[in-house]
Structures are given as structure tokens and as C-alpha cells.
Image (spheres, rainbow, N blue to C red):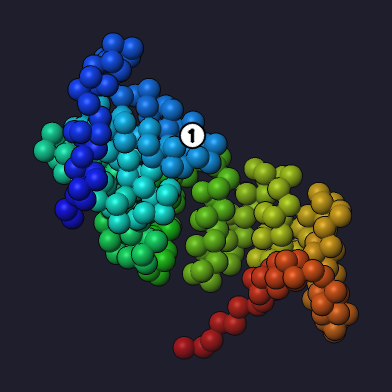
Amino acid sequence: MQMESEDNQEYSSSYTEQETATENEVFPDDGGRHHLAAGDMRGQDGDFPGALSEYKKAARLAPDSVQHLSRVAEGYAANDQPYKAIEYYQRALQTGQAKNEAEDLSEAHIGLGDLCRTFALSAAAIRSYERAVRSKPRKPYYRWKLAIALATLGLYEKAVEQLNVALDLVPDDVFYRFQLAEVFLLMQRQDDAIRELTQVVQLAPRDEYYHLRLGAALLSANYTGKAIPLFSRALQLNPENPSYQTLLRYAQARNYQEPAIAVDIEIIELDPYDQDFVRRIQKLSNPIEILDS
């Protein structure tokens, strides 16, 4: 992509030699890193235009920095300017390749992969994530990014491989283990999903949602008696939540094979948000029918 005129000017007239010299006196040998820090703080406060402005200033001071160019790209993405973000990620990658700084390119590959996913370009996202993984194979976050993109294309076995590598690196990470269980559910491997979700609940015993997800998985595998204590525990953790009360009664009705009409009436009486939540958990709880081949 060609740079727009306003961005061509960012590295010349809009930031004068005198301003650059003044900054170098205040922050000797800083290379614009103080602007990166300021941009990060603005971004954490929700000031995304301000963050982008700081990242641009950093890039003016160090125009050949892969990190600075990648951060400008992040700033554009946060400001809903995806095409500009792609442009700067590509610029960062070209700069890094010219300097032969392969390890510094992982951040740009991840950012570009994320943008590809927003445009439903899953294959392109996978290529970017794979390059990041090759650059930093021991970074579990990159493995997770790649796994989600693979799962989006139905490449579940490969997604499981990446998540297992991530868990080899951080065995007690609740989030990655939960994601692995989710992929197993997509594959209709209920027992594997239940095994992973059981570990998730053990690692995060006060997280009510994980209890509900394990309960739903048990119901979908027709382990109704084992599911009830999970829904009950979720309600104990958050006794004021009406949707949890309804889901517990739903699990009990399933266990005793009672008509669900009473539960349906309860759902109708919930507010729209809780109705949607209960329906989603119910859908996840539906038994999976294995058809004869």
C-alpha cells in the first residue's frame, strides 16, 4: 500500500529537527521509548487517539524501529482504522526483514493476523500466526492465537496440537485449558472436554461460569446426575443470579425426566439478558446424537 500524504509528512515537516533535538536533550538515547510508555498509559485509560499520537511521535524519533512501527499499527487498529493498521504492520515487517531482525517481527505478525481475522481472512491469519510461532515458539499466547484461527477453519486436530503445546509451557493456565475443552466440544469429544473442564474447575474453584460449562458438558453427555452439583455450586457462588436458579432447575428436570414446561415459564419471566444466557447454556447442554455411519 502507498503511504498517504499526511503520513509521509509525519516524518518530516510535522516534526521539525529542532523539536527532535529538544527531545533528545531531555531523553538522551531514549529513541522515543518515553512516547511508547506514554501511549501505553493513554491506551490503558481509553484515550486511543492520544495513544496513537504518542506512538507516531515515537516512530518519528526512530523511523526504522520495528517495535515503534508496530505500535503505530496497533494505535490505528484501536482507532478503527484497519487499513492504516495493515499498512503500518506491513511497513514494520518490511523494515525488519531488511534489517534481518526476525525475532522482532513476531508482534507485527500477531497484529496482522488479528486484523486478517476481523476481515474473516482465516487462512491469511493462520500464516501470520505461524510466522509468529516460528519466531517465538515458547510463547503460549502465540500458540493460542494460532489455535483459534485453525479452529475457525475446522482444523480442530491442529488446534488441539497448538493448545497442548501452550499447556506444556504453562500447565496451570486456566484459560488455555478452557479453550482446549471448547475445541474438544466442537469435535464432539465429550469425555475429553469433561476431563479438561474438570481440571479447569479445580484450578479456578470460585469461577461460577466454569462450573456451568462443566455442568452443561456433563448434561450433553447424559451424565445428568453428575451435572446437578455443578449447577448447584454455581448458584452457591452467586446465589442472587436468577438465571443460575433456573439452570439448576433445568438440570434437575433433565435428571428426573420431568416436563420442562415449568422451567420454560421461568425463563420467560427472566429479563432478556438472562433469557439469552439460559438459552445458550441449554443449547450447550443438549445431548449430542451420534448417527450410525
Q: Is residue 5 left or right of residue 171?
A: left
Locate residue 235, reporting x and y percent: 83, 56
Task: Please identify the quarter of the rendering in which residue 13 is found.
Answer: top left
The residue under the point 81% across, 49% down is 237
The answer to whether any part of residue 219 appears in the image is no
Task: Please identify the quarter of the rendering in which residue 231 is found.
Answer: bottom right
Locate residue 23, reporting x and y percent: 30, 17
Locate residue 85, reporting x and y percent: 31, 50
The residue under the point 50% across, 40% down is 47
Q: Is residue 74 above or below residue 248?
A: above
Locate residue 116, reporting x and y percent: 33, 59
Crowding near the residue tagged with mark 1, few <14, some 14–19, many ≥20 C-alpha atoms within 10 Å:
some
The residue under the point 37% across, 36% down is 53
The answer to whether any part of residue 77 appears in the image is yes
Task: Please identify the quarter of the rendering in which residue 278 is found.
Answer: bottom right
Pick the residue in front: 93 or 59.
59
* Type of the residue with mark 1: Arg
Pick the residue in front: 215 or 21.
21
Pick the residue in front: 93 or 258.
93
Q: Is residue 79 above or below residue 53?
A: below
Q: Looking at the rendering, in which quadrant would you find the N terminus?
A: bottom left
* Residue ranking furthest to the left: 98
Residue pointed to by mark 1: 42
